[in-house]
Amino acid sequence: MRTAAVIGTGLIGTSAALALTGRGVTVHLQDHDPDAARTASALGAGTTQPPAGPVDLAIVAVPPAHVARTLAEAQRAGLARGYLDVASVKGGPHRELEALGVDLTRCIGTHPMAGRERSGPLAATAELFEGRPWVLTPTAATDTEVLNLALELVALCHAVPVVMDADAHDRAVALVSHTPQLVSSLVAARLEHAEETAVRLCGQGIRDVTRIAASEPGMWIDILSANPGPVADVLARVAADLGETVEALRALQSRDEDERREGTAGIEDVLRRGNAGRVRVPGKHGAAPASYETVAVLIGDQPGELARVFADAGAVGVNIEDVRIEHSTGQQAGLVQLMVDPAAVPGLTAALRERGWSIRQ
Ligand SMILES: NC(=O)c1ccc[n+]([C@@H]2O[C@H](COP(=O)([O-])OP(=O)(O)OC[C@H]3O[C@@H](n4cnc5c(N)ncnc54)[C@H](O)[C@@H]3O)[C@@H](O)[C@H]2O)c1
Ligand SMILES: O=C(O)C(=O)C[C@]1(C(=O)O)C=C[C@@H](O)C=C1
């Protein structure tokens, strides 16, 4: 691929454009908000000049409800040889494209399983898709050249291609993305009118569970409106589990010993099923979850501290597999959790202590 156009220069479009530009592809940026395209261009994602002739691939990265019309318009204008969209739902937009009479041989639906709770070009990064699944939903009509262009985009973004049927994709993301978004929002919603004394105690648990509750409601209304049935099916099962969990907790308040025992069994069941589900979440690059160990380092809340910890770990040859930062409300310090290979823990701990870091067990 030598040339591409990105329509919709928000988080996803600009991230893809940055990755492509970084790998030598000439990218033309378009957005109905000229400021968004200009910002993406200023970040180095490409040019706002229209292409002189058809580009190799047009990437439609607008909200799901606008995908079909935007792609149809681009195709009518002869913008590209191949077209793809990146919307979080696949069945609905595909059926809209069919209804609009788009040439489906030149289009493919795709969905990168990577994102953030922030929108817009300023939240974009070239590395957003690295090691993440990127779903492709070709149909019998999809031209091989277009499928290959999509695969090339996925490879240039260092993502992992996963081919699926559009409706199977929508049922899968109802479970692994759309329901989690709603559950996160529901938990965070309990905080809206909570007492300040309670909110002040927020630790890492609630931060983990509510990060995506900060997502843009407009985008999610679009996504959920295009996948209501599968999401309602999963959420109904969560609601049934919630009902049973409430009953188990009430039983724990009983004076009757048998009832309390039943309550304990109910709670244990939900926690154990949670453990069993959690171990199925894949690790980095889609691999089986690796069991890393955590080395927790206390750092001051000042510029350069994090870089210094990373540099000290790098100096003793330790690869940091993942990292989390836990801030304590009202404190000028944070706890950095470095996830590393268990075999590296003793050496890393000793080396960091030697360099003056305080390690928490
Ligand atoms: N945010 C995520 O985590 C995520 C992850 C994977 C896929 N997606 C999908 O990617 C797409 C873009 O999401 P985003 O998070 O980048 O949103 P965003 O709000 O950051 O960006 C969307 C951009 O599209 C522009 N736009 C809207 N309508 C347009 C139109 N008709 N023509 C041209 N530009 C238009 C907006 O001005 C905005 O700049 C959506 O379809 C979404 O479902 C999002
Ligand atoms: O990590 C996040 O912030 C996301 O919301 C990303 C996420 C997800 O659920 O994994 C959200 C929606 C997208 O369609 C794809 C990815």
Image (cartoon, rainbow, N blue to C red):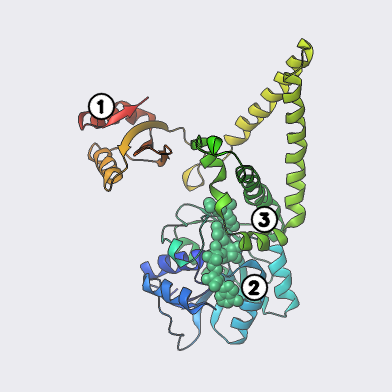
Q: Are marks 1 and 2 in contact (CB under 8 Å)?
A: no
Asked if residue 75 is positioned above or below residue 150 in the image, the reply reads below
Residue at the limit of the structure toward the top, as seen here: 257
- Ligand 2 quadrant in view: bottom right
Q: Which quadrant is home to the C terminus?
A: top left
Quadrant assignment, res 360: top left
In the visual, does 334 lie left or right of 235? left
How far apart are the alpha carbons under marks 3 and 1? 47 Å
- Residue 162 showing in the rendered view: no
- Amino acid type of the residue tagged 2 in the rendering: His
Can you tell me whether the CB of the residue at mark 2 lies under 8 Å from the nearest atom of ligand 1?
A: yes
Mark before the other along the chain sequence, 3 or 2: 2
Which residue lies under the disc numbered 1? 350
Label 1 packing within 10 angstroms: few (<14), some (14-19), many (20+): few
Asked if residue 284 is positioned above or below residue 69 in the image, the reply reads above
Can you tell me whether the CB of the residue at mark 3 lies under 8 Å from the nearest atom of ligand 2?
A: no
Residue 207 x/y as whole percent? 51, 41
Label 2 packing within 10 angstroms: few (<14), some (14-19), many (20+): some
Mark before the other along the chain sequence, 3 or 1: 3
Residue 66: which disc?
Answer: 2
Which residue lies under the disc numbered 3? 169
- Could you say which is closer to the camera, residue 305 or residue 192? 192
- Could you say which is closer to the camera, residue 209 or residue 66? 209
Residue 209 x/y as whole percent? 56, 41
Quadrant assignment, res 196: top right
Asked if residue 174 is positioned above or below residue 67 in the image, the reply reads above
How far apart are the alpha carbons under marks 3 and 2? 19 Å
- Could you say which is closer to the camera, residue 299 or residue 25? 299
